[in-house]
Amino acid sequence: MSPASRLKPLLEPRSIAFVGASNDPNKWGCIVLGNVLRGKFAGKIYPVNPHQKEILGLPAYATIADIPETPDLAAIVVPPNAIVDVIKDCLAKGIKAGLIITAGLGEVGEEGKRLQDEAVRLARQGGMVLQGPNCNGVMNPRHKFYCTMPAIQPQPGPLAIVAQSGNVAGSVAGDIMAKGLGISYFISSGNEADLH
């Protein structure tokens, strides 16, 4: 499989499982999902949270297994100790790409690094690509896909942003927008546990 086709579920998803979705406006699971919704993403969005029936107006699912189709992408905003189980659930469902926004893994110590390495090992074994963890997200303005922590929605354009630092990526996107230009992709790579 070519690199471009491996990355298509991450950069051009038709549907998203949003794992760790929340109605709490102080949590990233609400903030990032809200940004996806405000961007008018045209695909299906499946919030996953075992404690909620509805999140931001969408029906919620208790588990990934309960989702009625296989989403292209899992956006993951759960505590670090839940990451490995989430990756296992994604693989069991056949999900081919994961965006791990969660922080507190390889960047904070030995136990976090162990969890991060195990998640990557499982994902690679199952043919799943991972962006992150500890990242600001991904955007593809041509597809109205804004799955990021910063609440910005640049117009489509010719410039791509790929940065390890989410803050740098967000600042560059802001500068591009201020100049009246657009972007093709925004990728915050974070810990670069899998994709570099």
Image (spheres, rainbow, N blue to C red):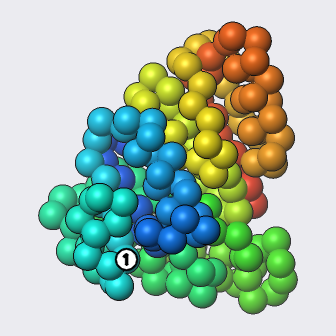
Percent x, y of residue 75: 47, 59
> Residue 192 falls in which quadrant of the image?
bottom right
The residue at the point 27 percent across, 59 percent down is: 58
Q: Is residue 133 above or below residue 154?
A: below
User: Is residue 171 shown left or right of residue 182?
Assistant: right
Q: Is residue 42 visible?
A: yes
The residue at the point 71 percent across, 63 percent down is: 134
Looking at the picture, tell me which residue is in the foreground, 90 or 78.
78
Q: Residues within 10 Å of mark 1 (few under 14, many from 20)?
A: many
Secondary structure beneath label 1 = loop
Q: Is residue 89 above or below residue 196?
A: below
User: Is residue 14 shown left or right of residue 33?
Assistant: left
Image quarter of the N terminus: top left
Percent x, y of residue 79: 59, 81
> Residue 43 falls in which quadrant of the image?
top left
Label count reads 1
Q: Is residue 69 above or below residue 170?
A: below
Percent x, y of residue 20: 46, 72
Q: Badge 1 is on which residue?
A: 49
Percent x, y of residue 187: 64, 40
Q: Is residue 108 above or below residue 158?
A: below
Looking at the picture, tell me which residue is in the foreground, 52 or 49.
52
User: Is residue 100 shown left or right of residue 143?
Assistant: right
Q: Is residue 125 visible?
A: no
The residue at the point 30 percent across, 36 percent down is: 42
Three-letter code, disc 1: Asn
Looking at the picture, tell me which residue is in the foreground, 43 or 59.
59
The residue at the point 35 percent across, 85 percent down is: 51
> Residue 132 falls in which quadrant of the image?
bottom right
Looking at this view, name the residue that lies furthest to the left.
Answer: 68
